[in-house]
Every structure is written in C-alpha cells, then in structure tokens.
Image (tube, helix red, strand yellow):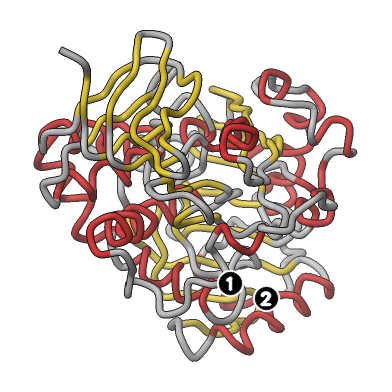
Amino acid sequence: MPDTADVVVIGAGVVGCSVAYYLAREGVSVTLLERESIGSGASAHATGSLSLLGAEFSPGASFEMARVSYAEFPELVPELEAATGMDLLYQRRPSLRLALDDEEVDLIKSLMEWQQPHVKMRWIDAQEVRSIEPRLSPSIIGAMYEEESAQLDSYRFNLGLAGGAERKGAQILYREVTGLVTDGSTVSGVQTTSGDISCGAVVIAAGTWSRAFTPWLGFPVPVRPMKGERLLLNYPGEPLPVLISSPKRGHMISRLDGLTSVGSTGGRDYDQRDLFAGEEFDRQPTESARLELLQRAIDVFPDLERAELVQQLAGSRPLSPDSKPIIGPVPGWDGVLLATGHTTKGIHLGPITGRIIADYIGRGSTQAVADMSEFLPDRFADFADADYLTAARSVDE
C-alpha cells in the first residue's frame, strides 16, 4: 500500500518539526521527511537564544512575529518536556546588551527608540552593569537591560518537537526528496528515493536546501547558506547571572548544563567567497573563527582566559535576500507552501512558523500575525538575483 498523508513536510530542522508538531496537534495526518537526521542543518549548531533585542527584527510585522513566537515558549516547552521526558535546558532570565564603544552605544539606543514601548528594558550605566556582574570588562560604557529573555538547547528543542509530533501521530521517514507529483498546478504527492508519498499539501522547510525546489516549482526560492560558528566552553567560575550579548562581539550565555556558549560568527566575519562557500564547507570549524570568538569573549569577560574549549560548532544558516523568513503559499500552486529563510532566527521563530503554516493549511489564512505581506513568498515573484552579502552583513549575531 503506498504511503499517504494529508501533509508532507520536507526538512526536520526546528522549523520543519515545528510545522509537523502544530499540524499533528490539530489532528492533521503528517509525514515528515528528512534525508539525513533530525536537526542535521542549522538547528543543531544554533545558540538557542530567544531575545527581542538586537537588529534581526525590524519595526512592525517583523517585531510582532518575534513577540508572538516568544510568547509560545512558556507553554510549548513544558508541553514537549512532559510528552518526551526530555530536559530542553530552557531558562528565562534578564539580559544585558553591552556597549564597549560609542558605535555600539548609538546602535543600541537607536533600537531602543522603537523597541522600548513593547519590551521592558532600560539603559543602565557602567557602574550598574558591574553591580550586576563585577567580572565584566572595565571597558564597558553601558548596556541595555532587558527584564526577561530566554535561551534553550536548540538541538534538544528540535528533538523534542520531533518526538512530540510523533506522539501526536506524525510519521518521520528518512528519505531524500527527488521531485513533486503534480496534476497541473496542483500538488498530489512527493517523489522520494524510496517511492512516492501521496498527499494534499507539501510544506518545504528544508532550510538552505530549499532553493533546490526552484526548478521543480518554476518559482524562486531565494535562500543561500550563510556560514556561522560558535564555541562551547567549560568555565570554572560561577555562571553568569544574566544572558549577555554585544552588537560587535556576539553572545555569552551560561547554559543550564554548565557550559558557556560564545559566538557567533556571521556575515561580518567572512569575505564573500568563504561566507557563501556552501553547506559542506560551512560544517568545517576554522581556527580563525575560534581565535576571533575567544578574543571577543575575553574582551567582554576577561576571566574567560581560564576557560577550556569543549566544542566548536559550525554550519549554514538559511539566508533570504532581505534576511526575513519566507512563509506561506507559493503563488501559482495549489497545496505548496514554504517555511524557510529564517537566517539566524529559526529557533526563535519556529513555533510561530508552525502555527502560521497550520493556519494556512487548515483555514486558508492566518491571524497569528496581522500583516503577513513581509513574509509571503509572493514578494519574490519577480526575483532574479540579489546582493546576499548586504543581507548577510546586516545580520546582528
């Protein structure tokens, strides 16, 4: 008997597993396809930071999507932990967005102008920064203090979503997709290396590999792999009491497993040749990134000189031309939807993406975000090419 499902989701990263989970939670028959393993792309090496600060989100719909997705986690995490028995290492605590020079001060304060009405935050001076954490560098000028942000282990979260979806009836198959089964402009199935799967809808959530569907759809899926690296350190001192980040120096987070996460490299750290070399190259950690990340961390937190390197992670992030996710129905097709291009925010935006896709499939529209026009695939209907380097440079790690 051939495989059948209401919906086939392609890609088992956090975004694809979120889509499968939210669909299965509504009683939809879901088959999740993955050619490698769960979380084998960007999700496995992501920081798992859930913060509304920084430059990744812009005023309007982008920031609304970020806030709505952030609000999903306090219920979603215990729901997944109860279903799977996993500890997702989820923590909610204040954060500091540090400025070590005038340029960072100006950047942080410019973002405050429109973020402050929506998030509990305030500017604090260097003295107050060090009253919170006296081990931080004396070079710090000041910081944005956010009353609450969050962080979890992205890989565990990915596995939790997959396991949760399975427990609600989803099927996970490890097969490579080789094409779509179509009748005119209507999708009726997915071709795989192990045979066809019949379905009424297909969700392409394959991260950086989503662009491979462009020729099959006759519609551009403009996503390129953007290299990124981060470190996990074993620091012998007391953990940091807050989650720390800096526009130029990245993040520094004491995880609940006792390790300290430091990173990340991104668009500002590579030339174009290395930044877009491709997925296989992106998985190779580099000595230059290791040294750069260690130096940045020590600049912020000098006592990290005592830390021991435990692991260096590297991989690709799915970068869209405007660094915003591509979510929703593909123009000209009945039953094909995209959920990709989340750049560095796939973990943060995974839950809201799952909810939005479930809404489109079940109801034909969504109210999860008031204005979806910034994220719909139809914004790329006339796409020919783009300066991805500009988009990459604007990503605030």
Q: How many marks?
A: 2
Neighbourhood count class around disc 1 (C-alpha, 10 Å): few under 14, some 14–19, many 20 upward: many
Which label's residue is closer to the chain start, 2 or 1? 1
For badge 2, the amino acid type reads Gly
Q: Above or below — where is 233 with respect to 375?
A: above
Q: Which residue is disc 1 drawn over?
A: 129
Is the N terminus in the top left, top right, bottom left or bottom right quadrant?
top left
Which SS class for mark 2? strand
Establish if 389 lies above or below 33: below
The numbered disc on residue 72 is none
CA separation in Å, label 2 and label 1: 7 Å
- Residue at image coords 69%, 22%: 285
Report if the CB atoms under discs 2 and 1 are less than 8 Å apart. yes
Q: At 36% from the left edge and 70% from the top edge, which residue is drawn?
A: 68
Name the residue nearer the viewer: 210 or 148: 210
Which residue bears the numbered disc 2? 142
Q: List x then y, in percent, for residue 378.
A: 59, 61
Identify which amino acid the numbered label 1 is placed on: Val
- Say which element carries label 1: helix
